[in-house]
Amino acid sequence: MIRSRLAAVAVAVASGATLAIAPAAQAAAAPGLQVSACAADLTAAIGSNAAAIDADSVGDTADARTYNLRTLVILAGAGLTCFCRPDQVHADIIAAATDGIHAAMSNAIGDSAAALNSEKAVAAALTDALEVVRYAEV
């Protein structure tokens, strides 16, 4: 039972990798105000996490888990694109990833209330990281 759920998580992470590349590519192609790849990844992770929160709010743990995994894949990319950022950004990304894993596992066992708490912690960490990045870019 656990192995099949872990296998499902691995498949979802692999498929989410394809979806996670798109936000940074779209930000790079957008004309006008230039947004760093780090800020684009953090913004995409915030959006994906918000979708997970919305799904968990109505008890849809399957969709929420998909968004949790997508958020984790985006955070893996953010770890690279935010490489030269202040240490606080890295700490927030690690905190968000840790809470994101808790949210995904909670959704895997159908506990949307626990997942929702973790997703709110992810949102707080990502918002903090994005504020630091935006401040550093000014």
Image (cartoon, rainbow, N blue to C red):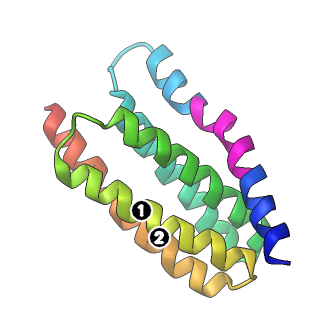
Quadrant housing residue 68: bottom right
Q: 5 or 116: nearer the eye? A: 5
The magenta region covers: 12-21
Q: Please tell me whether the stretch drawn in magenta is mainly helix, strand or loop.
A: helix
The residue most toward the front is 3
Of the residues shown, which amino acid type is indicated by label 2? Asp
State the residue at coordinates (85%, 68%): 4
Look at the numbered disc 1 and give the secondary structure of its residue: helix
State the residue at coordinates (47%, 38%): 77
Q: Which mark is residue 35?
A: none
**Residue 56 percent coordinates (x, y):** 67, 74
Of the residues shown, which amino acid type is indicated by label 1? Ala
**Residue 20 percent coordinates (x, y):** 60, 38
Q: Name the side, left or right, on which 22 lies relative to 4.
A: left
Q: Mark 2 packing: few (<14 Cα in 10 Å), some, or many (20+)?
A: many
Q: Is residue 45 visible?
A: yes
**Residue 41 percent coordinates (x, y):** 44, 39
**Residue 22 percent coordinates (x, y):** 60, 29
Q: Is residue 57 visible?
A: no
Q: CA distance from mark 1 to mark 2?
A: 5 Å
Q: Is residue 110 magenta?
A: no
Residue on which disc 1 sits = 96
Residue on which disc 2 sits = 99
